Image: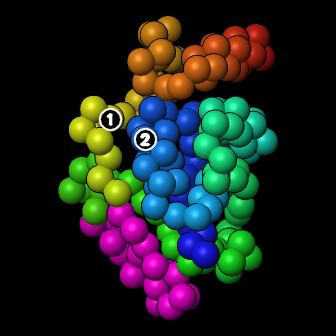
Amino acid sequence: MIRAIYPGSFDPVTLGHMDIIRRASKTVDELIVGVLNNGGKTPLFTTGERVRMLEEVTRDIPNVRIMSFSGLLVDFARHTESNLIVRGLRAISDFDYELQMAQTNRKMNPDVDTMFLATSLEYAYLSSTTVKEVAFCDGDIREFVPAPVPELVREKLRELQAQS
């Protein structure tokens, strides 16, 4: 059985992420979307909110499971008995960083390999950071994220404005 992990922050999940999830899920028996709980960053959504968001938008893909994790990705792979990491590449600049990470992960756990998927051209420009910047400026993000994410982002921004 091939069990893979597609890790990321998914803050919020974009159509680019969904493209990689759908394509990767067709090449493995089980795809675990690993939502990183990174204490070094301040995400817009909590880890739990990001997990629920991903569960909602992937519910039609039967071999996808959503889990959160913190710490080293290779430890998460060992914990979930995964033998493959899936990474999306938008540009050549992504490859430099991702190759270093793949080699480091392979050194720490030789049983885990990394598979790179080139992002579909229509999403090559897209990132969660860009989506948040557009949303913070009250722009329309519907063409960048799956439903119901635009409304969730609007609600979260209203909460933040009410707190300040």
Q: Which residue is mark 1?
A: 123
Q: In the rendered structure, find residue 19 and report the number of the disc placed on it.
A: 2
Q: Amino acid at mark 1?
A: Tyr
Q: Is residue 134 left or right of residue 70?
A: left
Mark 2 crowd level (few <14, some 14–19, many ≥20, 10 Å Cα): some
Give me the residue at 61% from left, 43% from top: 61
Label 2 – label 1 distance at C-alpha:
8 Å
User: From where the camera sits, is residue 91 visible?
Assistant: yes
Q: Is residue 103 left or right of residue 8?
A: left
Which image quarter holds the N terminus?
bottom right
Give me the residue at 52% from left, 64% from top: 28
Q: Quadrant of residue 31?
A: bottom right
Toward the viewer: 28 or 140?
A: 28
Please determine whether, in this image, residue 56 is positioned above or below residue 102.
above
Q: Is residue 49 left or right of residue 30?
A: right
**Pointers 2 and 1 in contact (C-beta within 8 Å):** yes
Where in the figure is residue 6, as x and y percent of width and height?
A: 54, 58
Which numbered mark, 2 or 1, is in the foreground of this view? 2
The residue stretch that appears in magenta? 96-116
User: From where the camera sits, is residue 153 visible?
Assistant: no
